[in-house]
Amino acid sequence: MKRDFDLIIVGGGGAGLAAGIMAKKAGVSVMVLEADTKLGGATALSAAVMYACNTSVQKARSIEDTPDAMFNYMMTLAGWDTYPRNMRILCEQSGPALEWLIELGVQFPKNYLLCSGVDTVPRGHPSMGLADALINAAGAAGVEYALGTRVDKLLVKNGRVVGVSANGDELRAGAVIVTTGGFGNSPEMIKEFYPTAAYHGDWTYSVHMNAPFILGDGIKLGRAIGAAIVGEDTGLLLPTSGLGKWIEAFMPPWIMLVNTQAQRFMDESAPYAVSGYLINGQPDKHAYAIFDEPTLEIASQDMRFADPYHSGTAMPTWEYNLLRQSIANGKITKADSIAELARKIGVDAETLQVTVDNYNADCDKGCDSVYFKDMDTRFPVRKGPFYAREVRACVIGQTGAGLNVNERAQVLDEHGKVIPGLYAAGEVLGCGVGKRYFGGGMGICNAMVFGRIAGNEAAAEAIKSA
Ligand SMILES: Cc1cc2nc3c(=O)[nH]c(=O)nc-3n(C[C@H](O)[C@H](O)[C@H](O)COP(=O)(O)OP(=O)(O)OC[C@H]3O[C@@H](n4cnc5c(N)ncnc54)[C@H](O)[C@@H]3O)c2cc1C
């Protein structure tokens, strides 16, 4: 059958570009079809932290790390309820993928290396120039691309994917890779595939908001030809005060967080690898940040607390002027006593008083005797007026549901059989992350590792079937 290209890649974000570069290296012609007016997708908008182990960057800091150690961490955090085969691949291939990116010109400054999950080994590699390096390398390798081209169908002949249709045109290829990213901008897909996020209604929004085609097209394309969809109701939900819709991931350590039973339930400074899951695990899936006047005045203006990632700007929904404004317009509840505050937010006053008293006693001792928050940040709830703001974990940082693939990035159908000619990589995978987001950088790690595998494997199939 006549083909227009050996390989078609649907989506020109991180995974698609990585796949394209690898496939060109393997000697096939590659066309990337991108719905947006530019390449890069969410990858280009991201903070570009990559989670990886056993890297030259870690070695330059004398940090010992192995794929086994990373695998054990992931499996433990997920309570073994994850996709071990894919986790193993991420662990083994994250290091080589990162070294490959360095060869492409991406910088991973060793001084920025951080523990981005709840692990003890720094595996979060902040980078500079990642998306540009991928776009440039794809161009230099001769990857062709068409912008403004939203693929709406996979073409199938005799059970094999043989091309795509977009904008009314059909294009044929020896293999197709779907790398359309997540579905954070589609309320309809969120409702169907991420009910915990949908639960929060108007509060819910996605960090992908500036990537207009993060709409779950890959799920629709696959489902239409019998691909299995896995990983429902998984992903990463980040906490917010809901006082605006900005990209944020952290809560300030100076709040005391209580659930609707007026009890503390976590270290308020916990990393986002666990904080959102803890909040969504509470009754009614929300909590209240409680603080007093001196804390508001001093702590919220202290950049040590306002900017935990040293980005140079304060966490937007916890910024001092916004908090003052929100008190004035009633979005933050104000009261002269703890009992009045409890009544206004509808929690039990006696319990809230006990919680506050215990918290204050711990602040005085400089030791959180229950949740072990770093009490150097000692901000008791003692001097009125007192304030409360509802907190929800509803900012979608990553969607988890999507296509299922095997170790060669081949898409599987509902019976677990390979769909010939079809590959997938990146956030469109439902088996990439599992029930837990392991730490900052997993999205890029997944896109790079499976993008590279998909590019290699699909190129080999395209050559074989030519
Ligand atoms: C603000 C922000 C910060 C983040 N920070 C980090 C971080 O620091 N570390 C980390 O690991 N992860 C981070 N993430 C998540 C991470 O960026 C993503 O998980 C990862 O980049 C996804 O890569 P991808 O290639 O799968 O998808 P994308 O890079 O999103 O690419 C998908 C592409 O497919 C295109 N597309 C969609 N549908 C179609 C269609 N039908 N036809 C043609 N093209 C289509 C889209 O327009 C897009 O260009 C962040 C995300 C955001 C938005």
Image (cartoon, helix red, strand yellow):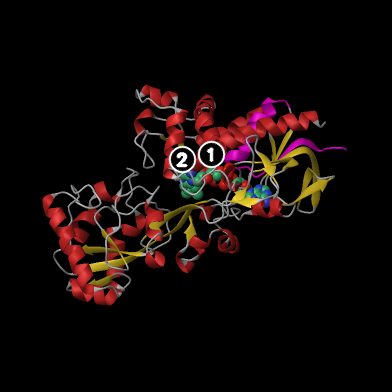
Q: Which residue is mark 2?
A: 75
| Category of crowding for the residue at label 2, using alpha-carbon neighbours closer than 10 angstroms: few (below 14), some (14–19), many (at least 20) | some
Q: Tell me what residue is drawn at x 24 percent, y 72 percent.
A: 334
Question: Which kind of residue does numbered mark 2 sit on?
Answer: Met
Kindly state the secondary structure of the residue where label 1 is placed.
helix
Q: Tell me what residue is drawn at x 19 percent, y 63 percent.
A: 356
Residue 69 in percent (x, y) is at 42, 31
First reached walking from the N terminus: tag 1 or tag 2: 2
Counting the numbered discs, the total is 2
Residue 284 in percent (x, y) is at 40, 68
Is the residue at mark 2 in contact range of ligand 1, meaning its CB lies under 8 Å from it?
no
Q: Tell me what residue is drawn at x 31 percent, y 46 percent.
A: 308
Q: Which mark is residue 84?
A: 1
Residue 293 horizontal side relative to residue 396, left or right = left
> Is disc 1 in contact with disc 2, using a CB cutoff of under 8 Å?
yes
The part of the image, by quadrant, that contains residue 232 is bottom right
Q: Tell me what residue is drawn at x 67 percent, y 46 percent.
A: 147
| Category of crowding for the residue at label 1, using alpha-carbon neighbours closer than 10 angstroms: few (below 14), some (14–19), many (at least 20) | some
Name the residue at the left extreme. Answer: 364
Which segment did they paint magenta? 1-27
183 vs 167, nearest the viewer: 183
Is residue 421 in the magenta section? no
290 vs 332, nearest the viewer: 290
Question: Which kind of residue does numbered mark 1 sit on?
Answer: Pro
Kindly state the secondary structure of the residue where label 2 is placed.
helix
322 vs 348, nearest the viewer: 348
Residue 13 in percent (x, y) is at 59, 42
Work out how far the residue at label 1 is from the one at label 2, CA to CA, in angstroms.
7 Å
The answer to whether 126 is drawn above or below residue 231 in the figure is: above
Name the residue at the right extreme. Answer: 1
Which corner quadrant holds the C terminus? Answer: top right
